[in-house]
């Protein structure tokens, strides 16, 4: 994704919100999908879901996906879903780093996500209601998983977060690469 402000400094933080279910769109929920996220901190939020401006370690919390774990292994230790920004453990600035790896144990399908961004919003569709989808399939709670590579949410109001302000003459660039395999 690329964006260029024309005449004023502009906050730009583009993201995409594709839902993935590696078992197939009509295979049920993603709670058995194994997830690994390459981020050892999150940007915690307040009771209105606004980032606090702090960073919090994921170690020994339900947010710890530093090693592969099923989505459903600790989801019920939370208020019903994952919807949080991870601070990525980037190996280099402005180059692609591994963000996440997902595997469906039934189909054997695997997905890796790589990006040049500093954060990823991890969302497990816990608010998804019964929605009619492709071929008449019904999509239910936990029917898909999303990984939204991005800058940190609310960075314009959090001086400790990396800036998302792009000035005229500068170019905002956002790369994400998906790699799929099967075993």
Image: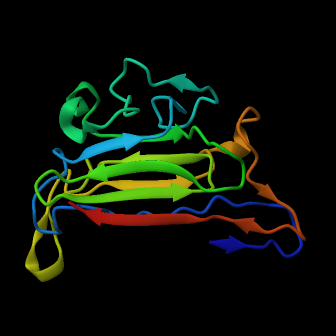
Name the side, left or right, on which 8 lies relative to 17. right
Name the side, left or right, on which 160 lies relative to 152. right
Camera-side residue of 82 and 154: 82
Name the residue located 62 percent from the left edge and 53 percent from the top edge: 117
Camera-side residue of 47 and 133: 133
Residue sitting farthest toward the top: 60
Whether 3 is drawn above or below 72: the answer is below
Find residue 14 and report its horizontal and vertical position in percent.
Answer: 60, 63
Whether 3 is drawn above or below 55: the answer is below
Whether 153 is drawn above or below 67: the answer is below
Total marks shown come to 0
Find residue 166 and report its horizontal and vertical position in percent.
Answer: 81, 60
Q: Is residue 18 visible?
A: no
- What is the quadrant of the C terminus in the image? bottom left
Name the residue located 81 percent from the left edge and 71 percent from the top edge: 5
Name the side, left or right, on which 69 lies relative to 91. left
Name the residue located 29 percent from the left edge and 29 percent from the top edge: 78
Rendered image quadrant of residue 67: top left
Q: Is residue 20 visible?
A: yes
Tell me how the rendering is colored: rainbow
Find residue 104 and report its horizontal and vertical position in percent.
Answer: 19, 54
Rendered image quadrant of residue 68: top left
């Amino acid at each position: 994704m690329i964006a260029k402000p024309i005449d004023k400094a502009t906050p730009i933080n583009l993201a995409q919100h594709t839902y993935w279910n590696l078992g197939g769109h009509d295979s049920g929920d993603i709670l058995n999908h194994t997830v690994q996220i390459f981020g050892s901190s999150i940007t915690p939020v307040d009771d209105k879901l606004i980032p606090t401006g702090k960073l919090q370690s994921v170690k020994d919390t339900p947010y710890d996906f530093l090693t592969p774990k099923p989505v459903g292994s600790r989801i019920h230790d939370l208020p019903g879903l994952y919807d949080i920004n991870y601070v990525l453990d980037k190996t280099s600035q402005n180059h692609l780093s591994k963000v996440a790896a997902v595997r469906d144990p039934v189909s054997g399908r695997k997905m890796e996500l790589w990006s040049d961004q500093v954060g990823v919003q991890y969302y497990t569709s816990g608010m998804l209601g019964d929605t009619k989808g492709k071929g008449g399939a019904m999509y239910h709670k936990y029917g898909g998983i999303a990984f939204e590579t991005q800058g940190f949410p609310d960075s314009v109001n959090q001086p400790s977060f990396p800036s998302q302000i792009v000035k005229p003459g500068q170019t905002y660039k956002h790369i994400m690469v998906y790699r799929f395999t099967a075993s």
